[in-house]
Image: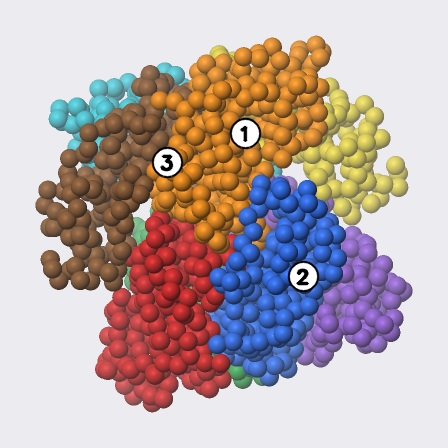
Chain colours: A cyan, B purple, C green, D blue, E yellow, F red, G orange, H brown
Amino acid sequence: MTDTRPDLASYADLDLDRAQRRGYPEAVFCAGKTPEQVAGIATVVKDRPDVVTLFTRAAESHAAAVRNVLPDARHDPVAGLLAWPPDPPEPTGGRVVVVAAGTSDLPVAQEAALSAQYLGRRTELIVDVGVAGLHRILKHVDLLRSARAVVVVAGMDGALPGVVAGLIPAPVVAVPTSIGYGAAFEGLAALLTMLNACAPGVAVVNIDNGYGAGHLAAQIAAPA
Amino acid sequence: MTDTRPDLASYADLDLDRAQRRGYPEAVFCAGKTPEQVAGIATVVKDRPDVVTLFTRAAESHAAAVRNVLPDARHDPVAGLLAWPPDPPEPTGGRVVVVAAGTSDLPVAQEAALSAQYLGRRTELIVDVGVAGLHRILKHVDLLRSARAVVVVAGMDGALPGVVAGLIPAPVVAVPTSIGYGAAFEGLAALLTMLNACAPGVAVVNIDNGYGAGHLAAQIAAPA
Amino acid sequence: MTDTRPDLASYADLDLDRAQRRGYPEAVFCAGKTPEQVAGIATVVKDRPDVVTLFTRAAESHAAAVRNVLPDARHDPVAGLLAWPPDPPEPTGGRVVVVAAGTSDLPVAQEAALSAQYLGRRTELIVDVGVAGLHRILKHVDLLRSARAVVVVAGMDGALPGVVAGLIPAPVVAVPTSIGYGAAFEGLAALLTMLNACAPGVAVVNIDNGYGAGHLAAQIAAPA
Amino acid sequence: MTDTRPDLASYADLDLDRAQRRGYPEAVFCAGKTPEQVAGIATVVKDRPDVVTLFTRAAESHAAAVRNVLPDARHDPVAGLLAWPPDPPEPTGGRVVVVAAGTSDLPVAQEAALSAQYLGRRTELIVDVGVAGLHRILKHVDLLRSARAVVVVAGMDGALPGVVAGLIPAPVVAVPTSIGYGAAFEGLAALLTMLNACAPGVAVVNIDNGYGAGHLAAQIAAPA
Amino acid sequence: MTDTRPDLASYADLDLDRAQRRGYPEAVFCAGKTPEQVAGIATVVKDRPDVVTLFTRAAESHAAAVRNVLPDARHDPVAGLLAWPPDPPEPTGGRVVVVAAGTSDLPVAQEAALSAQYLGRRTELIVDVGVAGLHRILKHVDLLRSARAVVVVAGMDGALPGVVAGLIPAPVVAVPTSIGYGAAFEGLAALLTMLNACAPGVAVVNIDNGYGAGHLAAQIAAPA
Amino acid sequence: MTDTRPDLASYADLDLDRAQRRGYPEAVFCAGKTPEQVAGIATVVKDRPDVVTLFTRAAESHAAAVRNVLPDARHDPVAGLLAWPPDPPEPTGGRVVVVAAGTSDLPVAQEAALSAQYLGRRTELIVDVGVAGLHRILKHVDLLRSARAVVVVAGMDGALPGVVAGLIPAPVVAVPTSIGYGAAFEGLAALLTMLNACAPGVAVVNIDNGYGAGHLAAQIAAPA
Amino acid sequence: MTDTRPDLASYADLDLDRAQRRGYPEAVFCAGKTPEQVAGIATVVKDRPDVVTLFTRAAESHAAAVRNVLPDARHDPVAGLLAWPPDPPEPTGGRVVVVAAGTSDLPVAQEAALSAQYLGRRTELIVDVGVAGLHRILKHVDLLRSARAVVVVAGMDGALPGVVAGLIPAPVVAVPTSIGYGAAFEGLAALLTMLNACAPGVAVVNIDNGYGAGHLAAQIAAPA
Amino acid sequence: MTDTRPDLASYADLDLDRAQRRGYPEAVFCAGKTPEQVAGIATVVKDRPDVVTLFTRAAESHAAAVRNVLPDARHDPVAGLLAWPPDPPEPTGGRVVVVAAGTSDLPVAQEAALSAQYLGRRTELIVDVGVAGLHRILKHVDLLRSARAVVVVAGMDGALPGVVAGLIPAPVVAVPTSIGYGAAFEGLAALLTMLNACAPGVAVVNIDNGYGAGHLAAQIAAPA
């Protein structure tokens, strides 16, 4: 591994003090990086077990490269996420509830839930409660009202975050997904719906950005 | 008025037999026509009291021009619509319910309701029942389920038609409106939401097209 | 199969009572689901032969997974659709005619026709009648006029639905397809054409949404 | 007027030899120019009565400025066009037929017809023959087939050019107009329809570009 | 005023219990409503001094209508906002800091600050600290780090929220504005920048949506 | 082959009389059709050697299917085009010159040239004359001026058609290509450039539509 | 005026040291500011005659407000620009040539030329040399080749910058303008053309951004 | 090789005198060309060792074809670039600094740096200094201020070029990259950000256009 470290400066400048500065560590976005580059970063990370590092958007090749360096890293292939050290911190602050409108939204929702968990919050996951059958979301209202932050993940029409926001006091972090076809335009339709939600209290993040949603929810639900 | 009629062929070729061919008369779309042109058309229409003629998107100047020729025409300034002869036909077929998500959607909803009425259907109007407070639409479920066709008019996030479609057996005619700002993009956001509605049974028409929605609902609810 | 069912709640919450509530059963949209998830849903469905279940957008792997659980399910590979129980219900209500503008629009048209059929309507299919040769559609006018709902499927310029709507009394359900290239923009051109159709009576659904079109047509043509 | 000419070089460099080079003179596009600038150009033009000059997109203030310098210029306020010298040349080449789909498309169609006429062709104008009532265009087929070039002007769905192209041997110059609302997107819908016309033989020009269409038709119908 | 109240049901269905359900009262969005409609709503509001009502996007005519009914309502013409009762509640929870990137973003920033204040938070406002001169924002870092929620309002390139998010632990509510020209596309450029912010912790709301941003910040900074 | 013909009606309705009606035969657009469907069409075509049939956008599998039925069909793999009967007709009318701005535009240009040739015109091809080095196009001005129609094929900035149109009397058929990257947006940039060409006389067709350009040029250059 | 200064901090934080830091002073963008705000800024500027201040996008009301405080400021109403102190600095560095494709592009070109001049460069202006008549630009090649930076301002097809770049060694600063109509989409077409210019050496700035272009050209042509 | 050269005229017209005319040689854009075509061009290039030729966007197959003809060509696979002759010229003029915002932007940055180097400039490369951690870019300010031109390559929010421009006197050549996902829209978000940069002095090139950025920087930093 020593031969990997000399090269690091030629492709990355890690922000390891971000946890000090912001209270939340930097994550490693794997898409667009070679497995070799990701492995090089993992080698540096290995010296800092005091900081939780998340590797997001990790393909199988990235995951293998990370686990070669950090064999005990936790890997969730549905979410495309690795965490090291593998055990999440003791939860503090309020509860984060993550809601996936449809089955296909599950990978993004899982990424959000794990991100919030590793950044220090208690999380719960609710699945397949789209607006085509309102009774499905209404039966979870008590759990939703108990949260300090709710993440709602939805593709296609993206209508669920606005409906949830109208039911609860906490902010809703809305994540449009690229699930859908035709005039869904790879998540654009859901994104616009969420930006125009009739109910105030909807915080929109980028399409498919489960990590960002989990991070934001963790900040909102942080201890005062 | 005689001097107006010779010119008609230079700007219009009325489709007065459409009522025979399709069962529904042609409407006169006033926007983009001069008041003089609209008056010329009204003069021809005057000879055909057997056909209901609607003048849509009529500004005050158009309305004045029509009423100069057809003094007893009914004028609804909120909807920007005139009808002649002024009395709607006896209703046949099923019931049409028109729903306006917000107060600002009322002009388009009114245009839809009047169009369906003049094309021969019984119509009811429900106002200000957006998804930010679900209880407002849920209290009308019985009326909605009694309809043969429901028109739902909504701007901003355009989420209401999908929610209504999930509650009832009849088709929902969804009309996006240009109400909203910013990323509503003059109705584009609502339009995309409706095209991607999770619940099947949503028939989308053009932004602000109240007339088209009323016409379509009248066809759907026509007697078998 | 028993080991699949315990997991179902982690990725899906079936709306099996939709047939009661709306009169039409929920369909299973396979794209974006794993074959394992689809198989898990099929296992639940197996206990409800009283409800017709459609599996739409089914790739070969989805189809194999469904047929593993429901061996007698009907599979139409052109439409990417499976139906179980395999026999459609006795038709009621009015006739649905499905029109495909070009040969390449056939898969979407077939999906529409089968959907309408399994939701209880008599259906007919007409193929390759684009507006470049008007005589091709004009020779079918009598059949078109006999329908209670007409589905028109078209890519490229998407002009056919407006032309058909101008010829008949029934509503036209217009389905833009992603057939075309360049400025067709994956169906956007056809979608906009249909939304702006000069003839009223055009109900637009999402690009390539054959299932939604068939569902809507079945609702329109339902018995009074 | 002499004080205007010294300034001309500071804002314009007329291409008066274009008639020699291309066979067609340069036109003066007034929109975006001040009346003073247009007047200055008119003063130069005055010395070249051998060249036909068209002033296009002329508002009332531009028209007054031109007529102050060239009192006998012909002014068509519907088309927003002035021509000087006022008499069109003797027609040569084939016939140009200009078709306006709707009454509101008339100004653009008129601009096209006058442009073709002043560039040397015989022209005919047909109005209000949109595809919602096919019989209206079909009754003009003989005239359309006699043309060497047909200009079709249409807003909203822009479907007419493709239908006309499928009926005749000559090229169709298709002009989308900004007539319409909502998803017409100021002529974008019509533009895309025309670019995707199923029938080959459709030559598309810019939205509302009546002058360009007339020019192109004049070139196509030029004597061999 | 009594003659106004009977009509209310024909255009609005107030959600006066939203304060109970969500903890925050409904606001009245004036744009798209007539002054008469706004006055009618104000008349109902008058009976509920226990709830803070905000009238947003109020033009002068709306403001006059409100003040006719509620003479002591507070009116901030820069923000286009009225509040009644006029005194904001005692602040609870954490601090909200509102940052305006440029002078022209001030109206939206002011709307956000007042909204957060009337929903119960302490607020501070910082102006003209765009990224073209980083020293301007860096000098406020201590204040920014003391906030429980920061609202950043920016047009043109919209780069400021991401820069601020990288400096602080609290969430940033990012509000794109329509300030700019050309490729700013009425706020679209700023919106996309914010959705793609490299730093996590950016919650995006609609273009120019100062009210929504203040509401969201108030929720984030609510007492635990 | 006999077993293929019975099915034809289920997927195609050939317009074999188009040559009579329009003077130009229908082409078979292969993309989106299965090789089996294309073979079925070829079988029908085989009975009509009096009509030239072009198979466009033919992948290798389509080409093999056609040649299985029509072994002597001419196949140009660069253009993705097959023609049968293989010999083009004797040329009539004026000359068509096809210009490819860059090497990568050659397939589309070749498709245009062959189409014009098989529809009866003399054609010439000029390659790699983009506007970055004006001398390259200027050296061909005499040939360009001798044409009755010029087809200009260009991707990236799409500037060449406007430059050529300014140099010659004949119409320019402009074909944007999807060559380029980034803000070329798959040909959109070139398309917009051509629609906005400063020089009149530019007839735009769809992106990559070599066949349509060749057809249009053949019509323009047809004998009077 | 003294009463204006206390308020300045509430809406602006001037970056008066930018001239030290970057070598170029900050400009005051007036659009979106009230005349009172602009006057307040002018009052501060008045104390710093060592720095050249430009007020850009100044409407008449802004200009009056500036001249009330700085009576000798130079005002160019065509460019919407004021400069104070009124005399530009002695020119240093290389020559900047500004080219306006059409007469209507003159305001933006003038803004660019004045900006470069007040930032310290010698400037020349060439007008109305669009690509529809190449001879017009070719006659200026010697002047263009003498420049250290050339600004090319063009609307509609935006083709000129690429053509100029292919002729000269210096960089071309390309400014798309919103001149045009229809598919020019307020300058988008020209912008895309310039970003895709075949000739390298084209530096693109925002639509109508004459000031930015002049600033960039001044930097490029700065003394070494 | 002789059999390759006769064909060259059928697909390319090399601009070998561009180095004379503009001072910079033509590059060969490989994407869209076949390896055979690229080899043919390399064969011609081989006779002109006095001119530096760059082959850009070269896939492995292009690289092999070039090296078959020019075995000593330098190949940088990260940048997808080959140069021949392999040794860059002695640097003249000012320094060019290339900055990559993130690791994934490295290929484009490398292409820019090598292009500037082969066109005659000294270059330096800085990597992974995005705005989420400002301290990373601020530590390089001295190097940045020493440059005559700075190239900043950034995807996602594209905010870095504006921040850098505000810190230095030299122009910034901004290169948006297609790095990102969702609302990054393949680089569109970064492109718009850069066009709207608050700091003047930002010269934008096409998405992923490293070669163009290096070329432009080389021109800006050319010896006076």
Q: Secondary structure at mark 1?
A: helix
Which residue matches tag 1?
A: G114
At 44% from the left and 46% from the top, the residue drawn is G139
Q: In terms of depth relative to the viewer, which is nearer, E136 or C89? A: E136
Q: Is residue H55 left or right of residue D157?
A: left
Which residue matches tag 3?
A: G170
Work out how far the residue at label 3 is from the one at label 2, CA to CA, in angstroms.
43 Å
Q: Is residue D24 left or right of residue E55?
A: left
Q: In terms of depth relative to the viewer, which is nearer, F137 or F2? A: F137
Work out how far the residue at label 2 is from the one at label 1, CA to CA, in angstroms.
37 Å
Amino acid marked by disc 1: Leu
| x then y, percent, for residue H99 | 32, 28
Mark 3 Cα-neighbour bin, 10 Å: few <14, some 14–19, many ≥20: many
Mark 2 Cα-neighbour bin, 10 Å: few <14, some 14–19, many ≥20: many
Residue A139 visible in the current orientation:
no
Q: In terms of depth relative to the viewer, which is nearer, F107 or F39? A: F107
Mark 1 Cα-neighbour bin, 10 Å: few <14, some 14–19, many ≥20: many
Q: Same subunit under labels 3 and 2?
A: no
Q: Quadrant of residue E100?
A: top right
Which label sits on residue E152? none
Which label sits on residue D84? 2
CB atoms at circles 1 and 3 under 8 Å apart?
A: no
Q: In terms of depth relative to the viewer, which is nearer, E199 or D118? A: D118
Amino acid marked by disc 2: Trp
Q: In the picture, which quadrant includes the C terminus of chain C?
A: bottom right
CB atoms at circles 2 and 1 under 8 Å apart?
A: no
